[in-house]
Amino acid sequence: MTMEDDIKPASAAQETNVTDAVSPAAERSTFQRVLTVTVGPIVAAFVLSAIILMLVGVNPLTYYGYILERSLFSGLGLEQTATRMAPLLFLSASLIIAFRAGIWNLGTDGQFLLGAVISAATAPLLVGVLPGWMVLLVGFVLAALIGAVWSVIPALLKAYQGVNEIITTLMMSFLGVLLASTLVKLVFRDPTTTVPQTRTLPVEDRLPRLFDTSISSGLIWGLLAVLLVHLMMTRTAFGLRLRMVGANPAAAAHAGLSVPLLTMATFGLSAGFAGLAGASEILGVAGNVRANWDPAYGLMVIPLVFLARFHGVGAIVLVFFYSALLIGSESAARRLGVPQDFTLVLVASLLICLGLGEFIDQRKRRKER
């Protein structure tokens, strides 16, 4: 048998594989999977929410029409949707790093708030002392550092004692939320106001707006953060090391990797991006932090990152959809007299249906094997 004879069967097999890949059966399988995982759950969630709305005497078509009008078909609403995305994108980057490395960083809300408070406390004091761009840079750097510092205890316990990070990060998040509020009330309080809050960063000193709109340029930085994190975790040797540690720490140690140091690095990077999320909200939109302010963005983003399968582009799409849903449903609730909490009902229905769709898809794939 010659070498050519060996090559021909392989080539024929490759041709067969290519044909199978584009066959009608394969196309149907892909289409069915899209229906099961994405389209079907979304439709089911909106139908379920429509039934609930009808039960309370609200026309669901009118409600959904207001959502589309307010979040996508209104210029101001679209701007608000884009602006809402900025902190959520930074948090997505934070969680992509942690989850791809096998670390459950559930303390992002505390890291977010501490980053927001430190940037809100320092930036107004630096206005007029430093150039505008440097004021913003210092605010972002300090927010990233305080976020990373707040993850040191869970990181050390995980890296050197093997303590479950789910418990420690949740505990540190709880403490971080309380500490942030305490700092606003006692240390960083603006003495010129009656309401406990930090000093306010003037609008002209905040992040620039995009194209003469109200959209904060934090949106651009958030998009870059997600894309760069995705590339780091999937295309670089450092990202591969982090993923190896998460997949099999024993094998990573056997390969000569320093598992404790890489674990610490994962916590630091993830928490740092959570701190940046807080800074983007304050330096780009709010300008100050009020006592007891806690939007709980971190808990919102966790299911989105999971449903995106830790993929950067998928996370961006889901964050946009989620932001539009939040902005639109808040307006619809006010117009129709629906309780604001119904926004959470709609979001919860969507997440549950998406999770069920994922479960059904996994069962089908197991049976096919």
Image: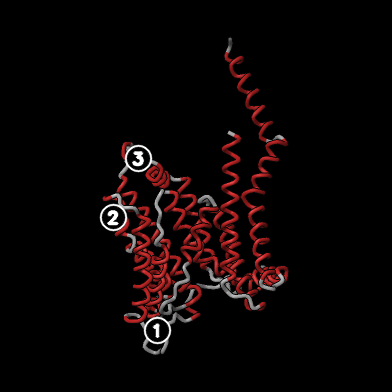
Q: Is residue 119 left or right of residue 350?
A: left
**Residues at marks 2 and 1 touching, judged by CB atoms closer than 8 Å:** no
Q: Nearer the viewer, mark 3 or mark 1?
A: 1
Mark 1: which secondary structure? loop
Residue 311: x %, y % from top left: 53, 51
Q: Quadrant of the C terminus?
A: top right
Q: CA distance from mark 2 to mark 1?
A: 34 Å
Residue type at tag 3: Ala
Residue type at tag 2: Leu
Q: Height in image: 98 above or below 240?
A: below
Q: Height in image: 201 above or below 144?
A: below
Q: Which residue does the numbered mark 1 point to in the structure image?
A: 196
Q: Quadrant of the N terminus?
A: top right
The image quadrant of residue 166 is: bottom left
Residue situated furthest top in the rendering: 1
Residue at x-position 44% and y-position 78%: 288
Q: Which residue does the numbered mark 3 point to in the structure image?
A: 252
Q: Height in image: 193 above or below 131?
A: below
The tally of labels here is 3
The image quadrant of residue 333 is: bottom right
Residue at x-position 55% and y-position 69%: 84
Q: Which residue does the numbered mark 2 point to in the structure image?
A: 156
Closest to the observer, 158 or 122 = 158
Mark 3: which secondary structure? helix
Report crowding for label 1: few under 14, some 14 to 19, many 20 or more residues within 10 A (C-alpha): many
Mark 2: which secondary structure? helix
Residue type at tag 1: Pro
